[in-house]
Amino acid sequence: MKKKEKKSKFRIFKISNIILIGIFCYFVTTFAEQQVSLNKYNSQIESYEAQIKAKKEELKLYIVDKENETSDEYVEKVARETLGLVKPYERIYIDVSK
């Protein structure tokens, strides 16, 4: 009977070890997957923060342009750059090498 008791104890010990190893493997793989997801989300957050910062800078430029919209310098700048207008008797030089 002692041999039978040893075998059953050994089998129970083996089965419990296998179950513990399985649970440990499950937790390790779950942790690794969550870490990968967390890293991906952190990189997305950094990307979104950079986009927000760029948009805020662009918004500041638009606000400055809106404030200067009625000034003579701004009107002249827009007329020269976008419409290609010049003042009377002003000479225009065009670089033909380009």
Image (cartoon, grey):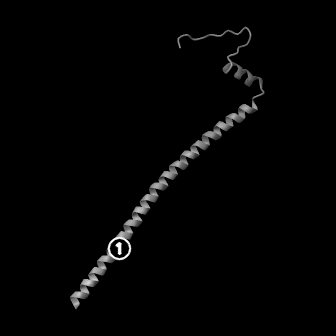
Single out the residue that lies furthest toward the bottom: 1
Q: Residues within 10 Å of mark 1 (few under 14, many from 20)?
A: few
Q: Nearer the viewer, residue 50 or 82?
A: 82
Q: Give the residue type at disc 1.
A: Ile
Callout 1: SS: helix
Q: Nearer the viewer, residue 18 or 94?
A: 18
Q: How many numbered discs sit on the rendered protein?
A: 1
Could you say which quadrant of the image residue 2 lies in?
bottom left
Q: Left or right: 40 with respect to 53?
A: left
Q: Left or right: 70 with respect to 52?
A: right
Q: Left or right: 76 with respect to 27?
A: right
The percent coordinates of residue 24 (x first, y second) are 38, 68
Please name the residue shown 28% across and 84% down the image.
9
Please name the residue shown 74% across and 32% down the image.
66
Give the residue pinned by disc 1. Answer: 19
Please name the residue shown 57% across and 46% down the image.
48
Could you say which quadrant of the image residue 54 lies in?
top right
| 79 is higher (above) or lower (below) than 51 | above
Q: Nearer the viewer, residue 71 or 81?
A: 81
| 52 is higher (above) or lower (below) than 3 | above
The percent coordinates of residue 89 (x first, y second) are 73, 8
For the N terminus, the image quarter is bottom left
